[in-house]
Image (tube, rainbow, N blue to C red):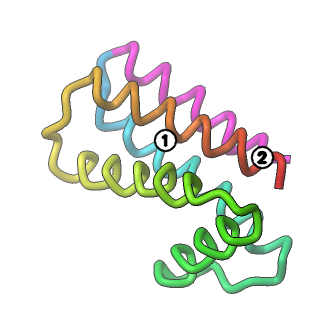
Amino acid sequence: MLTKSRSLIDQAEKSLREGDSLQACEKAEEAALLAVKTIAKRQGWEYEAKEAQYNAVLKIARWRGDRDIVMLFNTANILLHNFREGWLDDEYIAADIQSIDSLIDTLERV
């Protein structure tokens, strides 16, 4: 169901291994966002605007009774900031990619 998000996580991990941490951040953030948009679209929720995306995350978390979804999604925001500014260590980025991978695992069960 979320095969494109999975593919983006694979690309993020590959980029990080190859030393392109900014590309890794961009791909991982895109994977999280796409996963949320996919669920929102399926539910008939608005998802185009940033506010709508964050609202969709809250709806999913409430629906599933899992507040960790919010925290895992917030990781994507950190990676987006790092993509723009480039201040995170690769070890931190790797951990955040794994968090987004966990988010996708969770959203696949929605």
Q: Which residue is mark 1?
A: 28
Q: Main secondary structure of the magenta part?
A: helix
> Is 4 above or below relative to 47?
above
Residue at 29% across / 29% down in the picture?
92
Q: Is residue 14 left or right of residue 22?
A: right
x then y, percent, for residue 47? 64, 79
Q: List x then y, in percent, for residue 14.
A: 49, 19
Q: Secondary structure at mark 1?
A: helix
Q: Indicate the position of residue 37 as horizontal and vertical percent values.
A: 67, 67
| Extreme-top residue of the structure | 17
Residue pointed to by mark 2: 2
Quadrant in which the C terminus is drawn:
bottom right
Magenta stretch: residue 82 in it? no
Question: Could you tell whether 30 is left or right of 4 in the image?
Answer: left
Type of amino acid under label 1: Ala
Find residue 110 and name its label.
none
Contact? badges 1 and 2 (CB < 8 Å): no
* Position above or below: 108 against 18: below
The segment highlighted magenta reads: 1-18
Residue at position x 67%, y 43% from top? Answer: 104
Residue in front for this viewpoint, 77 or 63: 63
Position above or below: 13 against 25: above
Q: Give the structural element (helix, strand or loop) at label 2.
A: loop
Mark 1 vs mark 2, CA separation in Å? 13 Å
- Quarter of the image holding residue 69? bottom right
Q: Position of residue 38 (x, y in %)?
A: 75, 63
| Left or right, residue 43 beside residue 4 | right
